Amino acid sequence: MTEKIGVLGKKTSRRTDVERIVVTPLPTVHGKFRAYGYVDHERGVEQVALVHGDPGAEDVLTRLHSECLTGDAFGSQHCECGAQLVSALGHVADHGSGVVVYLRGHEGRGIGLLAKLRAMALQAEGLDTVEANLALGLPVDARDYGVAARILDDLGVRSVRLMSNNPRKREALVRHGIRVAEQVPLLIPPCESNITYLRTKRERLDHHLPHLDAMAHVSFGP
């Protein structure tokens, strides 16, 4: 059970599967954020949301960022995740307010770190990112965004301007009661190591990546 402040300042108790544990200032290279720490009791996963400024409740500039150790921490160019995280934090800071929800447990579109590495090994042998997951007997995308919606609800966010190229994120938030006023592209220039991956995301996972049109006939090979 967690204690919430209800109307007229009265304390009410209700059970929630996502509990806010701590709020602390978090200065970053992008600007000053506040880190909101949560526990997802249903899955046993710790989660964090970074909040900049006073986002308000409506049309909040928001990024739901799926955890990607290889991209976020190691700077892998196999994907564009690390660059997207940096870009999202920068956009929020430049805008003056917003939220970045960092979703742990989403590694490899929800299949986990070691399974993702195994899928990457298969991609190095010629499979695309969809084929690799399926070859391992794993779902193409196992992510759930319910926890993100509950975190946004706790932050008082009712509608968002969602920084994402993935229409399924938008659909998931809407299903969980968060209105998406706008989907804001978060486009990262491709490189030799991720162009095939990005093309697969557009062609097989419906990601909106119009900047790849200009590179339709570009080859990074010798």
Image: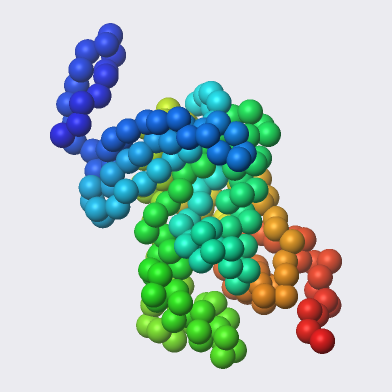
Residue 54 image offset from top left, x and y in percent: 53, 23
Above-or-below relation of 173 to 215: above
> How was the colour assigned to the protein in this rendering?
rainbow
Q: Residue at x 27, y 18 (%)?
A: 6
Judged from this view, the residue extending furthest toward the bottom is 125
State left or right for residue 14 relative to residue 220.
left
Quadrant for the N terminus in the image: top left
Q: Is residue 85 visible?
A: yes
- Of 124 and 144, which appears nearest the observer? 124
- Of 179 and 123, which appears nearest the observer? 123
Residue 207 image offset from top left, x and y in percent: 62, 62
Q: Residue at x 40, y 43 (%)?
A: 48
Q: Is residue 59 visible?
A: no
- Of 81 and 197, which appears nearest the observer? 81
Q: Residue at x 73, y 70 (%)?
A: 191
Q: Residue at x 42, y 28 (%)?
A: 156
Residue 130 image offset from top left, x and y in percent: 52, 77
Judged from this view, the residue extending furthest toward the top is 8
State left or right for residue 180 relative to residue 12.
right
Residue 46 image offset from top left, x and y in percent: 32, 48
Above-or-below relation of 134 to 186: below
Above-or-below relation of 21 to 143: above
Q: How many marks?
A: 0
Quadrant for the C terminus in the image: bottom right
